Image: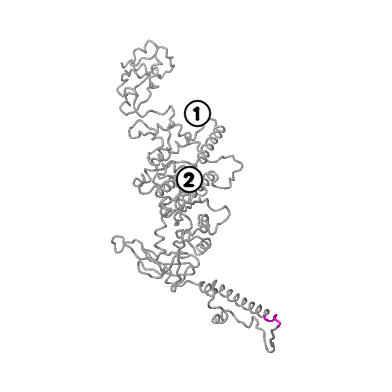
Amino acid sequence: MTGQIGTIVGLRLLVTLRNESASIAMSRVTSSPDFELDFEGFESEREEDIGDPLDTAQEWDTFVDTEGEEEEEFHRFQVDWTTGNYQPRTTKAFKRTPGIKQPIAVDASPLEVFSLIVTDELWDLLVTETNLYAEQLRTQIPTTSKWTPVSKTEMKTFLGLCLTFGILKLPARRDYWRQTKWLFQTHVPKAMSRDRFDMIWRYLHLQDNVDPAMDKSDKLWKIRRFMDLLLAQFQALYEVNGYASVDESMVKYKGRLSFRQYLPMKPVKWGIKVWVMAESSTGYVNNFQVYTGAIVGKTETGLAHRIVSDLAQPYFGSNLCVYMDNFYTSVKLLLDLQGRGVQACGTVRAGRKDLPKNKELTKAAGLTKHAFNVAQRDDLTFCVWQDTKTVMVLSNFHDPTEHGSVRRRVGGQRQTDVRAPACLADYQKHMKGVDLLDQMVGYYQIHHRSTKWWRRLFFYLIGVVAYNAFVAARSVGGPAWKYRRTGYKDWLEDLAQELIVPVTARSAPSLRPTTPTGASAGHDLAQINSKRKTCKECSLKHSGTDVTFSIPLLSILLRSSLPIPLRSSLPISLPPSLPLFPSLIMFAYNIVFIVYH
């Protein structure tokens, strides 16, 4: 119906222009002094005499220039989808130069590349807001714990340890500081004491809670500034190669949150949804947007259209090729992106508006396996391909006559190349960008329990920063790059090691046994009874751990409750000046001990 109305309007417009052109030409001729014309018997043609434009469609050749550009443009406009006489289409070249935008040395260390994204401004933000929040919280809730403002070196060490915890996973965070068993002996205590790490973890913050300039109607205000700074650095460091994919990524979170999402088909079913545009071949994130749900009291229409338009906005006019799944793809979106200089392709749901209605172009076509049908309308190409299920693909730049191949199993044998339309083959090739990102970041993501939702998002973004830096470094490394064979894990390990600068507090234990000092230097303590080992130092001397020896509290209480003359009869002698402990229970225990011996 829409196509017929457009045709009628176009015909009436051309007829009107024709009449006006004839009137202008006639007025110019009659204005000449040498012009004479006999008007007798001449009747002016009225609009009513022209008739309906649809009835005169066959008479176009009598008043339209058949060799002009107008006819070519008119015949390119197709009212409906056609399955033959395809017009050729060509993919437009990407107008930007792929690769890094900032100079990176071939032998640059992981920390040097990482610092191009996490700049001094970001480090200052972390340090300043963490110290400010600690001061505010300790003022509101007085505490006896000691706190010294965190420095930039400590913050780098803290973040390096967090990356380490994502690589070396232990059941609990405190296990990284355990030294009683060789299984848990790591170098983490050398870098930072457990108490200091816990303090920084508690006060870690990204935004001043009482800043009057902050718009708290934004659901992401706690992390908005940090995200904006990261996104600017992502786009300033690296340019994609002309192919990108759009998909959603889930950040695991099961706490109470207004914009928490549930996606049953995703590996991470509960969490925060992040719309991501990533380079197809590498997974480099060049744009992202956190979904905060619908506005209260309003129902958002065209969500998928808005998301893709927002993510592709920095690439308007660049001829970037964007691939997406059937949640986003629609005829309206692809036409809009084409007008903005973005090429798009994706699978499409059968119920979308303006798709072909012919039976051979629907799920009811009854195609044999790996058979397909193709249709075209203007610059849009639509194909139906029969795999295990019917797959529909829509594109605004593919040639309907071109073909490619996809890998499929035929007859239960090994995978072989199967002929398919070019738009479907390219979709399968270039749609993996976000999935690759999720895979690489998920391998080494730090997992922790927290009621603060923004922390999950913070550590997810830190993982994205590390992977983006790795992709940028790899793009300039060349075949001889030292991480070419070892890959992302080895690169991330070196990054964490470079970030960590030992800031060990005096309370951190030593990793290697040392000579006992102080009260335990003589090491001549005897066994108290058959149910108890000798002493703490003796029981741990074979574990490879040195601890500062101290007499157990129970022994102190036991001996201090005795009169001074009886203390010398005990296995461990105590100073006579030790004060008496008036405890009836301890005294009774001592009487039993003396009788027993």
Kindly identify which residue carries mark 2. 457
Residue 394 visible in the picture: no
Residue 415 colored in magenta in the image: no
| Neighbourhood count class around disc 2 (C-alpha, 10 Å): few under 14, some 14–19, many 20 upward | many
Tell me the quarter of the picture where residue 508 sits. Answer: top left
Residue wearing tag 1: 146
Q: Give the structural element (helix, strand or loop) at label 2.
A: helix
Q: Quadrant of the C terminus?
A: top left
Can residue 31 be found in the magenta stretch? yes
Q: Position of residue 361 (x, y in %)?
A: 43, 70
Count how many numbered circles sit on residues in the image: 2
Residue at figure coordinates x 52%, y 41% from the top left = 121
Q: Residue at x 47, y 47 (%)?
A: 102
x then y, percent, for residue 432: 41, 55
Q: Which residues are magenta?
A: 29-33
Q: Is 213 placed left or right of 538 in the picture?
A: right
Q: Provide the major secondary structure of the magenta segment.
A: loop
